[in-house]
Amino acid sequence: MDLLIFGARGDLSARKLFPALYHLDNCELLPADVRIHALAREDITLETFLEDIKVRVRKYVDDSRWSEQQWANYASRFVYHRIDFGTADGFTELSGVLAPDRPAMFYLATPPSLFGPICEHLGATGCLIGDRRLLLEKPIGHDLESCRAVNDTVGEYFSEDSIYRVDHYLGKETVQNLLVMRFGNRFINTQWDQSCVDHVQITVAEPIGIEGRWNYYDGVGQLRDMVQNHLMQLLCLVAMEPPNSMTAEGIRDEKVKIVRALRPIDENNVRDHAVRGQYAAGWLRGESVPGYLEEEDCPAQDSQTETYVALKAFIDNWRWAGVPFYLRTGKRMPEKLTEIVITYKALPHNIFAGASREDVPNRLVIRLQPNEGIEMQMVSKQHSLRNKMGLVTKNLNLDFLGSSELDRIPDAYERLLLDAINADQSLFVGREEIEESWRWCDELIDAWQTRAPTLQPYQAGSWGPTKGELLIEKDGRSWHV
């Protein structure tokens, strides 16, 4: 197989793709015949490319997995091509390298504006004969119309079953374990609905700001950057019905049903169900950090781009009728945290009335980062002779790393690249679900523009604006963190 990475000198390739391929090679999971073609605009030799990428990859590889011999074996797979993605020059050379009877994967780690030209040039130069697969990074458009345009363009050259749309959250071990936990355990599956669940929280928090990406981020904002893809995928996996089988088609069909069942947040309810915020200057981990409008390269002192979003969403179907899903995501928050919290309803009658205990409901906490694992918060008897029936809250903790024989949890890109090599699309996003997600988000964006809710400031290093807290507290609930 030939794996061609467009944008091989970029940040994504250095931080994620090449380290992931190194680890697969180290674990002997990368087939021996896989050649890695690095494609970029710079006119450099293969030796220069490998010297540069070695330094960058080394930062993301565990010491226990690194050796000069392993790197030499890995580096022997590489071929470097200087190519301008926007013109047909150079693609003819690729057609002479790719054999029709040898599978090829094209990973576009490039801006979306290049998706169309790259596919067009590959097609025009005869590079798409035989088993050919296309991997696309987000964003797939910035609204429904542009998303359809991207899908239509790549669809002219690749069939839908050859297109792998990457959402790296789906490659995380905890996300995959969520499906196993839900559909492999009767005692959990039978209590996973509106009769037992009080509400669901999904939080994706980042301590970083925009990291010098002003020109990109200010035209996107947190809703498009995080909610439309990452949070929507987590929501679907929590709420979906059991698929008939663990195939790509089965999983995607059930996820699409959830997105279609999402109650619209429109101009009639946007003020009650959505909060937008933007971080101001503050303190984070003991250091002073600038506000969004004070970031480097910020030209627009009146920017109304949100860096925080909190939503109260409902899924109008039989399983989840009346159960609120609280979603929040933001930048410059106190810690890096991604978690799903399932809070169960209180018991209809407490036979331990008067017993000393904290009034904490049962919760299932699914952590994606920083430490992947699952916790069940449950009530237990306090060990005591003085207090016969004292109650305490205990955590049953499933630590994925600690409970396995592994010395590290594989990175999401390792799983996704391996699945793509094996032609398994079950952890990739289908066209229909991504377009339905944009349809729902577009209505929310239109409501914001129509009703223009005030952009709420929040101090860097905090958990967001006050109205984000009130969104859930007015319902008599509170954020888990």
Image: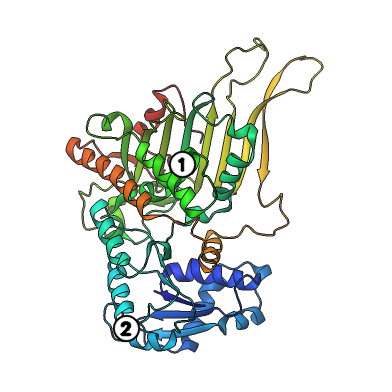
Judged from the image, the secondary structure of the residue bearing numbered disc 1 is strand
**Residue type at numbered disc 1:** Thr
Is residue 340 placed above or below 295 in the rendered structure? above
**Residue type at numbered disc 2:** Thr
Q: Residue at x 57, y 29 (%)?
A: 191
Visual colour scheme: rainbow
Q: Is residue 285 visible?
A: no
Q: Which label is found at residue 203?
A: 1
Q: Quadrant of residue 91?
A: bottom left
Q: Is residue 269 visible?
A: yes
Q: Which label is found at residue 125?
A: 2
Mark closer to the chain start, 2 or 1: 2
Question: Which x, y percent locates residue 220?
Answer: 29, 53
Distance from Cα at disc 2 to Cα at disc 1: 45 Å
Q: Say few, some or many: other residues with alpha carbon within 10 Å of mark 1 (under 14 / 14 to 19 / 20 or more).
A: many
Which residue is at the front of the view, 222 or 300? 222
Question: Which x, y percent locates residue 379?
Answer: 66, 25
Judged from the image, the secondary structure of the residue bearing numbered disc 2 is loop
Question: Which x, y percent locates residue 327?
Answer: 41, 38
Q: Residue at x 49, y 39 (%)?
A: 241
Q: Say few, some or many: other residues with alpha carbon within 10 Å of mark 2 (under 14 / 14 to 19 / 20 or more).
A: some
Is residue 388 placed above or below 88 in the rendered structure? above
Which residue of the protein is positioned furthest toward the right in this rendering? 385
Which residue is at the front of the view, 272 or 258? 258
Q: Residue at x 59, y 79 (%)?
A: 74
Question: Which x, y percent locates residue 274?
Answer: 32, 35
Which label lies toward us, 2 or 1? 2
Which residue is at the front of the view, 416 or 471? 416
Asked if disc 2 and disc 1 are in contact, CB closer than 8 Å, the reply is no
Q: Is residue 61 left or right of residue 108?
A: right
